[in-house]
Image (cartoon, coloured by chain):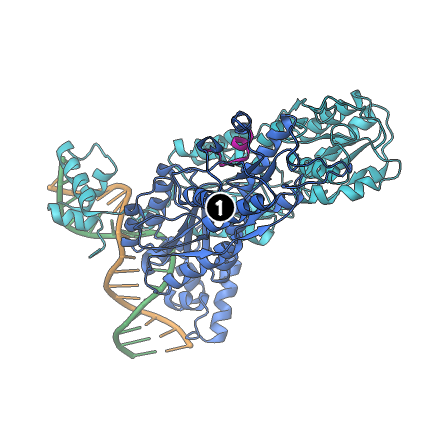
Chain colours: A cyan, B blue, C orange, D green
Amino acid sequence: MAQKVKLSTIADALGLSTATVSLALRDSPLVAEVTRERIKEEARASGYIYNRRAASLRTSKSGIVGVCVHDIMNPFFGEILQSIENELDRHRQTFILCNHYDELSKQRAFVDTMLQLGADGLIMSPSIGTPAADIRLAEDNDLPCVLIARTVEGAGVTSFRGDDSYGMSLAVEHLIARGHRRIAMIGGTELTSTGRDREKGYLNALAGAGIEFRPEWRVTGPRSRHSGFDATPQFLAIPDRPTAACCFSDLVALGFMYGLSRAGLRPGIDIAVTGYDDIDEAAIAMPPLTTVANGQSEVGRRAAAALLARLQGAPAVDRVELITPELKIRQSCDFLWPTGRQPSAMEPA
Amino acid sequence: MAQKVKLSTIADALGLSTATVSLALRDSPLVAEVTRERIKEEARASGYIYNRRAASLRTSKSGIVGVCVHDIMNPFFGEILQSIENELDRHRQTFILCNHYDELSKQRAFVDTMLQLGADGLIMSPSIGTPAADIRLAEDNDLPCVLIARTVEGAGVTSFRGDDSYGMSLAVEHLIARGHRRIAMIGGTELTSTGRDREKGYLNALAGAGIEFRPEWRVTGPRSRHSGFDATPQFLAIPDRPTAACCFSDLVALGFMYGLSRAGLRPGIDIAVTGYDDIDEAAIAMPPLTTVANGQSEVGRRAAAALLARLQGAPAVDRVELITPELKIRQSCDFLWPTGRQPSAMEPA
DNA sequence: CTGAAAGCGCTTACAG
DNA sequence: CTGAAAGCGCTTACAG
């Protein structure tokens, strides 16, 4: 390329002013149809590239929405992200993605960048340890925020997520209804609202059935497939071994089932297992995973819509919007292997 | 917040010029130590936010590197992205991520945005159907590109990827060495260099062992876990059924193994299976997946390093840098189930 | 060591 | 319907 072409290049070539060119390129009816077409043609022919920094500096709108989550690779977020992206696309907002891996420093670097770039809004699944002040800092600097999946107390913004406590109780009640009395819960942490709420649901369901919870049933920590796998030995070592395990997420359940198989146990037969999220894989897994649909695309859609409303000037509202989860019964709590042989789930391993 | 604070706000408060403030904030030795500290303190106290658009407009450097791949949720890319991010972080470049889902229009929108934002560079796994001209457009507008995972002929830039043909031949030769003569290949498409090269490796290995390829062995298409699962019936319907399948990727293999189990067949026993990529899950899967390590973190690291060199002024070079893959033998080609029972892989289903 | 001034490429009142 | 001019918030020579 010879010289960078800018508005004035086009204006000069056509004997017009930059004002007219600027207006025409943005389809302003103020510019005569013919002029507009000549301008667009010239822009195309000269390889003009719109300088968004300059425009944004002038207008203080950037057309950018930042989206930041802790685990981009988790299919749970995949679905949320896709529905956010759809919604944003339709409003011609550019979607900028970030994976903070639950590292506060990474999240802060991203929020800073968004601030410096003059992003119009932010959607995030807040990192473990996010202080409310971090959210308020963004809000105070004209960067409207909407939260997904997790809640930050006192942040003063809306967060969209599934009703984790209710959802987990659905899974545990299902297990209880199938005759299980010793039920472990694998994964999740006190450090997130998700972990706390799902544990609450587990405990509530147990209490509701008059089952006395034993602390050794609670295996905290795992939030990924691999750590679900790694938790298996700890589960197997629980005295008076539970016959069932409700897992923090599908990923944890899937890894845990691998671990069970590795130990010579048959998930769904020797040990009943439930997941959480109902990711795509749950339905094709072996055994197909009984889980809780978490409404991810609704979370994404509504979060994006809420942010878009904020961009139009709607005020921040301090509220959590709960999406009602739904139990998906498949076969991981009572599985008939294709060979035709089906021992009872209660049969000792 | 009352008023937006900018350089001049700080300058006025301290009785200095914006030039001095600007210099001080960027740690210029031109500014006296004491002055610098006073300025930084004032910036902190007043909640100053650096306006990157303004700076970037002035300097025509943005500190942004765009990264665009077709499947962010694939752990294969997860590892690449993480190593790119590490490398970029160390050079204080902001990493902006995009998932183009193999849709050319999404990729184009992203490249456009990067151009308009004045990004410094671009790393991408080009979408199916990317014309070389798309890459050249970016390069011609001062946006240096480096490709990963896939190659675009004639683009004139460097691409980093595994030696797919060699890698696949490793997997197939392993199968052949274990006695298999009827070997299917599941997944991948002619539309990407990856698909073409892996198929080439499969065909070469067959030919090298004097095995005559039969067209019905080639099940094209699947590139995800779910489509690998869905391909199972087609595989099972192949006349004179193959005893083994080499899969296009680990994800395809994992889905295919689910499909096999669903059909009452035992992966690793009734049908030998290989994957490709060696994602984290391969080692914990049941059966543990024999696969080909594809050097993803090296791909990421080297691609980032190459881009960084371009940002320093290194010229574009038209070359493909092949990372040598490595066979990882686990048990999916010869599996001993924990129950102790181990039928031959050749035994009819 | 610090300051005054120009300029990056847009858009937006304001005139005409 | 079109143009002249100011200004968004920085940084960079250039002076002093």
The residue positioned 54% from the left and 46% from the top of the image is B171
Query: Looking at the picture, how far across and down is residue A62, in whole percent?
Result: 38, 44
Query: Looking at the picture, how far across and down is residue A67, in whole percent?
Result: 50, 42
Query: Looking at the picture, how far across and down is residue B242, in whole percent?
Result: 55, 33
Q: Amino acid at mark 1?
A: Ala
Front-most of A4 and A155? A4
Q: Quadrant of the N terminus of chain A?
A: bottom left
**Camera sees residue B139:** yes
Front-most of A128 and A327? A327
**Camera sees residue A224:** no
Q: Quadrant of the C terminus of chain A?
A: top right
The answer to whether residue B37 is above or below residue A241 is below
Q: Chain of mark 1?
A: B
Q: How many numbered badges does the structure rendering display? A: 1
What segment is highlighted magenta in the picture? B219-229
Front-most of C10 and B329? B329
- Label 1 element class: helix
Q: Can you identify the residue that label 1 sits on?
A: B205
Query: Looking at the picture, how far across and down is residue B306, in whole percent?
Result: 41, 60
Mark 1 residue crowding within 10 angstroms, few (<14) / some (14–19) / many (20+): many
